[in-house]
Amino acid sequence: MNAVTLLDRTPPAAGCDRPVLKERGQREVFCGLTGIVWLHRKIQDAFFLVVGSRTCAHLIQSAAGVMIFAEPRFATAIIEERDLAGRADLHEELDTVVGRLLARRPDIKLLFLVGSCPSEVIKLDLNRAASRLDERLKDRVRVLAYSGSGIETTFTQGEDACLAALVPGMPTLSETAPAPLMVVGTLADVVEDRFKALFDGLGIPVVFLPPRRSRDLPAVGPNTRFLLAQPFLTDTARALEERGATHVAAAFPFGEEGTTAWLAAAARLYGVSEERFAEVTAPSRDRAKRAVARHRPALEGKSIFFFPDSQLEIPLARFLARELGMIPVEVGTPYLHRRHLADDLELLPHDVLVSEGQDVDKQLDRCRAARPDLVVCGLGLANPLEAEGITTKWSIELVFSPVHGYEHAGDLAELFARPLGRRDRLRV
Amino acid sequence: MQLTVWTYEGPPHVGAMRVCTGMTDLHYVLHAPQGDTYADLLFTMIERRNARPPVTYTTFQARDLGSDTADLFQSAVRDAYERFKPAAMIVGASCTAELIQDDPGGLAKAAGLPIPVIPLDLPSYQKKENWGAAETFYRIVRSLAGPHAPAPGHVRPARAAGTRPSCNILGPTALGFRHRDDVREITALLDRMGIDVNVVAPMGASVADIARLGEADFSVVLYPEVAGTAAQWLKRTFGQPLVQTVPIGVGATREFIAEVAAITGVDATAVLADPASRLPWYSRSVDSTYLTGKRVFIFGDATHVLASARIATEELGFTVAGMGTYSREFAREVREAAARYGVEALISDDYLEVEEKIAAAHPELVLGTQMERHIAKRLGVPCAVISAPVHVQDFPARHSPQVGFEGANVIFDSWVHPLMMGLEEHLLGMFRDDFEFVDGASPSHLGHAPAKSEPHDIQVAPAIAEAVAGGSDAVAWSVEAEKELKKIPFFVRGKARRNTEAYAVEKSIPVITVEALYDAKAHFGR
């Protein structure tokens, strides 16, 4: 385990032999609009305008659990009766709303029109609206559209749709130009900076998608190799591939093992020597192992059950099983991308039930029957399960907190140890 | 299309959820796309409920559209019945399902369940949460109590001698602002008057309880936003008189008692004579002198705004600097009240407009919702929360009602504590030149950080930033006047500066002198 396996990597068998329980029923998950909560913090000159209903507005302000209550860089254009009854032209109305918005916020450089369930159902063409507005606002504001609707996207797939919408506008990198490594997926700035430092140490030039400023979109071309930092970026990866880029397969950078595998995939590609790789990563690897080991006594041998939420479930279960000795019982994911998750699936113990999709009442029955030591689930299920005596970890925190890479491996382990530790403390 | 940043109310089906979740054996099957289940967390997280709301969502996706969403709905209805065995069911559509027009009511009827199935028609693109709650409660009451209605012209028999009068308490729901504690308080008050509670609904009521609403002698309309429509129907159908005074505040509680006494004929003298509230004495005690004329801005749902305006003026001696509501259904009542207090009512659910109006009114205290709490924080003005939309803080562990005499005590504390206490304000003024009382010093109970250093991601709209800064370059200050201004206690200095500048502009004074400063003071002096 300790040897750096830069050269002797055998590609996994795409996890094809593993049986997966496919469920279709009530899904207790957020829709893709929720991604706006972290996307608007990442791309700091972008504004997200949801074109939807009062429900959409209510969802976004409720989903984060707290309201930030400043004037945020997102809002909802609420469709009203007169819009549906044809008494108002939806495109004209939308232009007026955008005009008012941009007058208020001259600092906005990139505007996303975000489609919702109602806008999809009435077939409001937001791509058309975006190109019309983009043309009109040329040089001042870029206007793009994507769908975060619940009928098309589950939770983190909203980020996928958003990033995929950015790809066509990325500058073209010529066939002769050397291409930096592209890391794809929203990361907390602190995590991104740590990765940047590691890639610098390895001598690998690197760019990130999404960028912190919309004008800094990285260029893409046939020499581009990209690593996914998040497991839910199916459409973004496809869009990048359509522009000639190549996906670099790797386990996801959670925990010491995952982060090492992820960095090693890039190192192999850029011809980094074993010695250099070991030298650059050793201090961080040691720190990560020490930080993770601190939580092993609390978690080792404990069973864990994942309800589907963010598509992070499989890499996280792999981390908890291999680095902390936890026993995954069921790992639910809203959607399973076998190719992107091949390395993680391979590393996940083979007797673990992987389920895709959801029928929440049936899954609750399975969960109650299994009586796991820890359940990872959404906010709608957490308190009801706690009231039944089952310890829970809110899954949304795994999306909102910096958990990637070596320096956050200990924090990631702690997120799972804390609810168990709390239960031990309480005597009421 | 309406541009919305934050909303005061959710969509109408969330109102239906508040009614259903409050009840004990009713189930809601909601035709809704994936993602609408977010609403569960309002109940499980904000209210810390220990069970999932009794709601089944169809959570249809794109692949279901056009093919089998109706089948999906019907099987959801059957599965929900089999699994949860509710005593009755409400069915309806969320905003997206409304557009695909699957007719949940008809589909549920066709499923032929052996329980009452009540269809809801909640137009999502016109109406909002409170309307949805009121309509849902009305439909439930009509469907379940309707079969027990007496024949038209039937005269209510007189109560048997020796039996206590009974009433229904109407309006409390899940996720209601202090509804849990209000019900306990009002039940105890009625009990002291010798009156029994027949049914509290929707919160805590079963389907069977709703069916026997007609047995009560009268109804208490505790929250008209939710109970108004159903209460009017009960009055018409069962001849039940309504008590419509909402007992928030000492005066309103006394009127409520008198109204109940008049309807039932009970003798309320003892209950009225009992000095149950400390508010009147606390308000008259000398420490409260400093409350006199404090300018308050009041915003929230209509019930709490109307009650708060009365308490503020009659029971604490404040001045209403502005008031308004997001409850458009009660705009008339709030406008009339505002006119009595000499201000123009703000009827709006536009958070940014509310923020602008509060900034412009320069209140010394804001009584509002959690949204106004954040506005006030940003403006550096004390605030107390009086109304929904709710926050986890609005479900305190302790008993903390708003209604009745104990409610008045709670209100006195929660409104007065954010303000500087009388003696503290006096001392701050006296010692303003002491090095420990530098300008940044906040009252001790607000912690040690100056009020403005908020650690949040705060972006103030340009218009508001100007209004807050108050500084206008149009008038200049002489060095002496600037010096004199510094002698004014820091917590009123901003206001003095603004007033003086406004006065200078009005009188076309180019440079503010010490003279002008005191002229302005005399001009604005109360």
Image (tube, grey):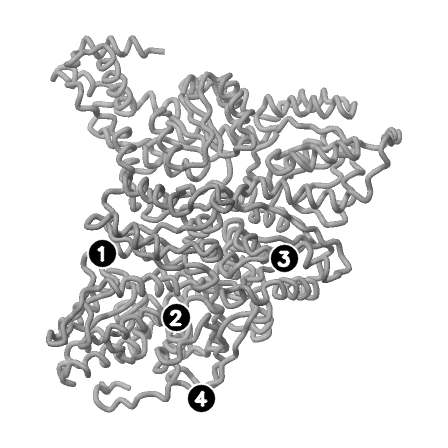
Whether the residues at callouts 4 and 2 have beta carbons within 8 Å, the answer is no
Marks 2/1: CA–CA distance: 26 Å
Q: Which mark is residue A17?
A: 4
Q: Residue drawn at (20%, 18%), measured in percent from left and top?
A: B485
Residue wearing tag 2: A312
Circle count: 4
On the image, the x and y values in percent for residue A309 come to 45, 66
Foreground disc of the pair 4, 1: 1
Can residue A303 be seen in this snapshot? no
Marks 4/1: CA–CA distance: 42 Å
- Crowding near the residue tagged with mark 1, few <14, some 14–19, many ≥20 C-alpha atoms within 10 Å: some
Marks 3/4: CA–CA distance: 38 Å
Mark 4 on the same chain as mark 1: yes
Mark 3 on the same chain as mark 2: no
Q: Answer with left or right where residue B457 lies relative to residue A418.
A: left
Whether the residues at callouts 1 and 3 have beta carbons within 8 Å, the answer is no
Q: Tag 1, which secondary structure? A: helix
- Crowding near the residue tagged with mark 4, few <14, some 14–19, many ≥20 C-alpha atoms within 10 Å: few
Residue wearing tag 3: B29
Which image quadrant for residue B57? bottom right
Q: Reading the chain from its start, which is encountered first: label 4 or label 2? A: 4
Q: Which mark is residue A214?
A: 1
Q: Chain of mark 2?
A: A
Marks 1/3: CA–CA distance: 43 Å
